[in-house]
Image (spheres, rainbow, N blue to C red):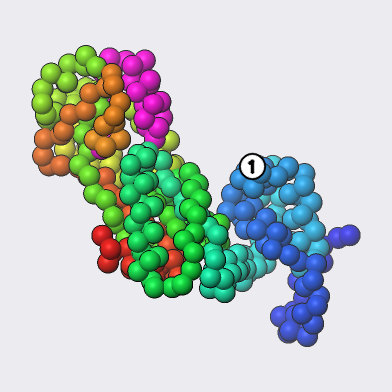
Amino acid sequence: MPVQAASPAGADLLEPISTLDDVDIRHIRYFLAVARCGSVSAAATELNVSQPSLSQQIIRLERRVGFCLFNRKPRGVEITSAGLAFLKGVEHIPHEIRAAMAAASPHRSAITIGICGGIPYATLSDVSEMIRQSILSEGRPCAMPRFQLKSIASSNQGALLRVGDIDLGIVRMPLTDPSLTIVPFSVEDMGVVMATGHPLGRSDIVRWADLRGQRLLWGDPFNDQEASRALLTAFRHRGWDPMLESGDIHRPELTIQTLHNAPDDTVAVCPRSTFRDYPNIQWRPLAGPAITESLAFAAVTGTRYASLLGHVTDTT
């Protein structure tokens, strides 16, 4: 059945609410995922559904609402003007439903937390305790919820927080998103990580001049886009404009393996806590001016979870 053109705004107001019975929250989630990812295939991967099934559900939603939500292109999709209007109206629905369930039930089963890459286990343990203490500070008679952790890049967490796929985020700063309440909880000096036997390990401290000519082990810049740009800018301001050596810097075991197999002049720059308990690796502090890594909680402003972050600052 062909998709019809959108009816005039006034006509929509005359339709009874029962005409929406065929639209469920799954359709909204699917639509939001495709709009966020810009392609059906990427959204299908994110949602863990088959691409043909997702395509059919989007077509079914378009038929139900009566207008095209996306223009199909050889590579991906482009949201239509009608789709943008629809997006503005429905993007908060999943989050509002989850918030309503949380407010109505004294036995919230879980809080879903997005975690950016490279967070040590000890830090995750500290974060969990901070949130538990914050919940206790609210004084609400409820059972302590479980925490469900999802590995999500800082730059992707804002969209997932807004649609309610995650409740709280642990992000790497800087992160500019006017819709979010952001509360820093950890600031740590960064230093140089290198394989055992690297010449820079002979000194107790690494000067910026020592790093000239050294390659920098560098992860996917899209994982933490703003933080990655800020870090490279800080290096260049201190006189080091390194050649980038691609590798995984968000999992310590892979970072160590990559450093041992990379060219001899390759180093990484990380906080000390990330590599505190690993052998066959050296960490040395950097001479001033220091560079720090700042981690923060994030939640959508105005939600219960943003209020929870206010209690976090009271308990730290």
Q: Residue 310: image x %, image y %?
A: 33, 68
Q: Left of 84 or right of it: where is 144?
A: left
Asked whether 7 or 234 is in front, the reply is 234
Q: Residue furthest right?
A: 1
Within-10-Å neighbours for mark 1: few <14, some 14–19, many 20+: few
Residue at point 18%, 25% (across, down): 212
Confirm whether residue 268 shows in the render.
Answer: no
Residue range in magenta is 246-271
Asked whether 1 or 270 is in front, the reply is 270
Asked whether 144 or 127 is in front, the reply is 144
Q: Can you say which quadrant of the picture contains the N terminus?
A: bottom right
Residue at point 32%, 63% (across, down): 312
Magenta-colored stretch includes residue 19: no
Q: Left of 205 or right of it: where is 32?
A: right
Q: Residue 103: image x %, image y %?
A: 53, 73
How many circles with numbers are drawn on the protein? 1
Quadrant of residue 283 in the image? top left
Q: Can you say which quadrant of the picture contains the C terminus?
A: bottom left
Residue at point 50%, 47% (across, down): 150
Q: Amino acid at mark 1?
A: Thr
Magenta-colored stretch includes residue 269: yes
* Residue marked by disc 1: 45
Confirm whether residue 49 shows in the render.
Answer: yes
Quadrant of residue 23 in the image? bottom right
Q: Residue 203: image x %, image y %?
A: 10, 22
